[in-house]
Image: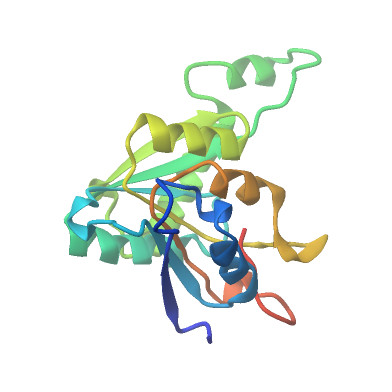
Amino acid sequence: ANRGTLVITDTPSDRGPVPPLAASTTKALVNSLECSLFVVGHNADPASIRRLLIPTDLSANAPTVFNCAAELASVYDAAVDLLHVIETVPYVALTPVDRLSLSTTSVPEHRARRRLSTLLDKSTLSTSAVDLHFEYGEPADQIGRFVNREAVDLLVLSPKSDPSSPDSLDPETDRLLRRVTCPVLLVRSPHNARSSGPETAK
């Protein structure tokens, strides 16, 4: 399949809700196809999609993902949540900037809000139609918790390849796609294509 194609696949019919990478056929598709991939449950009801989640690392592909989510939100008449996870590191010494970072709204969050505003301006996703969320910690953990806590109906994210292992998912996305059981849309674009060989997911 080329990058302009969307492949839709379902989870095994002989099992209950399972994460996308728990099914060997789905994992093989994720690792071998260059195009976008929509993974749904085998008995999924499209009318049940009412809430979309877009986890974003503010990468160059964000506007493409936002545009796809905007189209889906329009089709399903669904609400859109935009989540950015700020990775935290242990504090060795608290400088004035460190203390500010620990305040109600941290410096990294202020910066992320500015970048998100710029990226949203480049997309067709209206800021008035989006609920922004910021979490602190390890991205896969925080995204997985958000999906389960907020009863997300569709996860829309941008895949990347693992630089150290081109035929595998990067560890963060691998962990995430082994945890969530909601439908997942992996949106690929030339920004996250591999230089050679089939493209893999983030």
Left or right relative to 193: residue 48 = left
Between 31 and 156, the residue placed more toward the observer is 31
Q: Residue 105: tell me if it is visible.
A: yes
Q: x and y percent of residue 129 in the render?
A: 23, 49
Viewport quadrant of the C terminus: bottom right
Residue shown at 51% from the left, 54% from the top = 20
Between 97 and 10, the residue placed more toward the observer is 10
Left or right relative to 90: residue 21 = left
Residue shown at 67% from the left, 21% from the top = 97
Residue shown at 38% from the left, 54% from the top = 183
Q: x and y percent of residue 200 in the render?
A: 64, 68
Up the image or down, 168 lies above or below 16; here it is: below
Up the image or down, 25 lies above or below 7; here it is: above
Q: x and y percent of residue 152 in the render?
A: 34, 42
Q: x and y percent of residue 56 in the render?
A: 50, 50
Up the image or down, 123 lies above or below 99; here it is: below
Left or right relative to 81: residue 18 = right
Residue shown at 27% from the left, 55% from the top = 126
